[in-house]
Image (tube, rainbow, N blue to C red):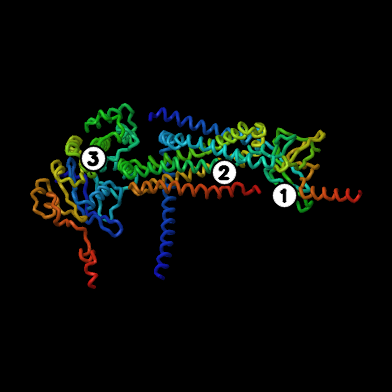
Amino acid sequence: MPNRIVSSIQNIGHRVIESVWRLGVASRFFILVLLKSGTSLRRFNLVIRELYFTGVLSLIIIVVSGLFVGMVLGLQGYETLQKYGSESAVGTLVALSLVRELGPVVAALLFASRAGSAITAEIGLMKATEQLAAMGMMAVDPIARVVAPRFWAGVISMPFLAAIFSVMGVFGGYLVTVVFIGVDEGSYWSQMQSAVDFRFDILNGFIKSCFFGVAVTAIAVFEGYDAPPTAEGVSGATTRTVVTSSLVILGLDFILTAFMFRGVS
Amino acid sequence: MTAETLIEVNDLNFSYGTRAILKGINMSMSRGQVVAIMGGSGSGKTTLLKLIGGTIQPTSGYVKFAGEVVHELNRDALFKLRRKMGMLFQFGALFTDLSVFDNVAFQMREHTNLPESMIRDLVLMKLHAVGLRGAHHLMPNELSGGMARRVALARSIALDPMLIMYDEPFTGLDPISLSVIGNLIRRLTDALGMTSIVVTHDVQESLKIVDYVYFIADGVIAAEGTPKEVRESAAPFVHQFVHGEEDGPVPFHYPAQTYKKDLNLEDTFA
Amino acid sequence: MQRTTMDLWVGLFVIIGIVALMVLSLKVGNLNVYNPSQSYVITGNFENIGGLKVRAPVKGAGVVVGRVTDIQFSTQTYDAVVKMSLDSRFTFPKDTFASILTSGLLGEQYIGLAAGGDDVMLKDGDKVMKTNSAMVLEELIGRFLFDKAAKDDSL
């Protein structure tokens, strides 16, 4: 019996050491990517190519989800607010929830599962089929040539995608409440405009989405580069990308929100 | 051997942790030679290639390439050195997101400032050498295994290297593609005046084209010689390998405890 | 995929993204009405600010002209010192009346500015002398009950 207790404690210790070690490897890799970003920024064509895969191909899911999230927000907000006779405040509700939280967070979650997983799978497969090793043997650094452009493409597209998500959401809310239900159009926009502040709401939302972009893409490229070069290895890494980035997004969101809105009681 | 030695491997040791992979390897290869490194699976042949390419560091000993000790070079010098090397990976390792043309042009675009028209001519020349000039517009997933390897060969000679290393170039090919690749290795080596190292376990095909053979077993060089010497060798290991016998110095069974003990036949009486 | 089509799509993507950011800033966030870079700050002392919060709007005739930037409790006068940052395009006379109002029955509280007739305008760092506290529901109900009791007594 004591043996089993000792071994389970050992197990915990082993896991902690393992994850701390992995975190260290990941941070070192992240710094390496930043240091070797020169090539991809000088040859911006490499980044443009990846922007197509991470940004343009994520557009549809972002637009559709944003529209629906906004419509649901409008519907639910109206249902609740009309009980208190302040259904004209529905614009405020939709816009504030989107700009502050849902836009950056949901767009980042979608981005992680759409683009993050694709980045991991692509880099993992390139590793498994020895393409990265071949590149290294051709005296081309795979971190500079393969990883860094994908990283920067992700970092650039995330804020745009979050903004598009929020705009689509505000439009979806407008569609449901103003066009279908018949809330006064003027009060929808004016209430929204008087409540949403540029610096506190929109700028902070923008900053949040930048953080999320860095986090998700960094996780995605690391998992891909670190994946065991087998079929299971790559599929496991892809799953880990989605799970880890989702958790990191939500955790980071809490921390950032606590910092940004601390001054607001 | 001839005076112009390109690669010198001196008392090379390498181990993963405590597990020794290579134990005191000595080799010498000169310009214009095709050298085969043979050995059973897991005998450390690929590790040897990685040591020559400088992707891993030896535990002791050194590899000298064109007069420079590979593992003592810093990153920039090593990358400069690798431009003089080409490597053909087992399944070609073509970049799947680039066309055949762009694959071959990859190194020229990365390492030179040649105008696009000149790159085009060079790429078509390289592809012509492997007989695939007509396939330049295809994507790698449209190629057969043999064709992919020929494209990879064209890609590895893109910058006219002094050395090409082939990692199992014959694996999984039909007899026709196999002799095509074999003859290409010989022809290109002679035409470009480079050195080729072929890591393989395809004895018959490689003995046809190489100048010299090293056998590696258990991390040491078990035998070496010209193809003629090897064919006629009476050494038990070489004989087993060349003639593909099941049992011999390389045992059929992985080291294990006795059969009886594994099946618990002894324990019942203990 | 051809390089040029890819470039086209990426270009479109970036343009859509920038337009989205601009829509958020101008249409949703109303950046054009309230630009914090050109503003002046005035203060006002209120006996009771109720539920007024930092960043609450400051309105003149219902139009947002600024925001509350700071709320402090003064231990000298035992009332609340509210700092307001106003857009410098909107100036108000010195005898402007600032009152804490509520939008709708349960809406957010804001500061309403009712312009007076003075010739001298409020400058940066000035103090609004005439203020009106927030209506606190408990006090209202209390006063209502007190009035009712008083009426009942008089009958």
- The kind of residue on which mark 1 rests is Gln
**Mark 1, chain letter?**
C
CA separation in Å, label 2 and label 1: 29 Å
Q: How crowded is mark 1: few (under 14 residues within 10 Å), some or many (20 or more)?
A: few
Can you give x and y, in whole percent of width and height, for residue B149 in the image? 24, 38
Judged from this view, the residue extending furthest toward the bottom is B270
The quarter of the image holding the N terminus of chain C is top left
Disc 2 vs disc 3: which is toward the camera?
2
Say if labels 2 and 3 share a chain: no
SS category of the residue bearing label 1: strand
Is residue A188 in sight in this rendering?
A: yes
User: Regarding mark 2 in the picture, which secondary structure is present there?
Assistant: helix
Image position of B229 (left or right of B199): left
Res. A49 image quadrant: top left
Asked which quadrant contains residue B194, the reply is: top left
Identify the chain of the residue marked 3, using the numbered disc in the image.
B
Image coordinates for residue A244, horizontal then vertical, percent: 46, 49
Residue nearer the viewer, A32 or B42: B42
Q: Which amino acid does label 2 sit on?
A: Glu
The three-letter code of the residue at mark 3 reads Met
Q: Do labels 3 and 1 share a chain?
A: no
Q: Which residue lies furthest to the right in this view?
A: C154
> What residue lies at 17% left-to-right and 42% top-to-bottom?
B33
Q: Which mark is residue A101?
A: 2
Q: Which mark is residue B162?
A: 3
Residue A45 relative to residue A87: left or right: left
The verdict on a common chain for dots 2 and 1 is no
The chain containing the residue under callout 2 comes to A
Relative height, residue C127 to residue A5 (above, below): above
Disc 2/disc 3 C-alpha distance (Å): 59 Å
The circle on residue A164 is: none
Mark 1 lies on residue: C72
